[in-house]
Amino acid sequence: MEETKRQKQVAALLNEELSDIFRRLGLNVIQNGMISIAAVKVTPDLLEARIYLSFFQIEDQASMLQKIKDRNWEIKRELAGRVGKQLRRMPELQYFIDDTLDYVFKMEKLFGEIQQPPAPPAGTDESSAS
């Protein structure tokens, strides 16, 4: 099912505000790594927001995700203060790891291996093949 215009508007609003909240709370730079909001998806009834977080140079992504979930009340309180006048009900926030970057790096590595020409067999001279 395709997202409605309202879903897209609410998702964009939440994405913008959450990015700023993460910056203010110091959640965007942790353990010499970086966390960014890759996407926000809102359910058709606007009561649930799925936030996909992208982790860059963070080894233990699962524990970092749990730390963010533990601070969910603080994030949600700040968010409600910012968007409370624009939404009837504050959506429940659910956090997920966005593995798109990992997938991209894996695909680039595979394509790099495919594009390399095979090494000529030992003992053969390429110039005599002409």
Image (cartoon, rainbow, N blue to C red):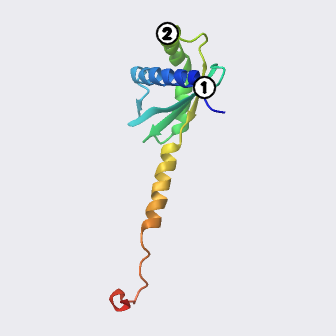
Q: Is residue 99 above or below residue 114?
A: above
Q: Position of residue 16 (x, y in %)?
A: 45, 23
> Foreground residue, 102 or 84?
84
Q: CA distance from mark 2 to mark 1?
A: 25 Å
- The amino acid pointed to by label 2 is Gly
Q: Earlier in the sequence, mark 2 or mark 1?
A: 1
Which residue lies at the image location 55% right of the left edge and 21% below the top edge? 72
Which residue lies at the image location 50% right of the left edge and 47% below the top edge? 102
Residue 118 in view of the camera: yes
Say whether residue 129 is left or right of residue 68: left
Quarter of the picture holding the N terminus? top right
Say whether residue 113 is left or right of residue 6: left
Quarter of the picture holding the C terminus? bottom left
Q: Which residue matches tag 1?
A: 4
> Foreground residue, 54 or 12?
12
Which residue lies at the image location 48% right of the left edge and 49% below the top edge? 104
For mark 2, give the secondary structure.
Answer: helix
> Contact, CB < 8 Å: mark 2 with mark 1?
no
Q: Position of residue 15 (x, y in %)?
A: 48, 25
For mark 1, give the secondary structure.
Answer: loop
Q: Is residue 30 above or below residue 114?
A: above
Q: Which mark is residue 81?
A: 2
Q: Position of residue 73 (x, y in %)?
A: 56, 16
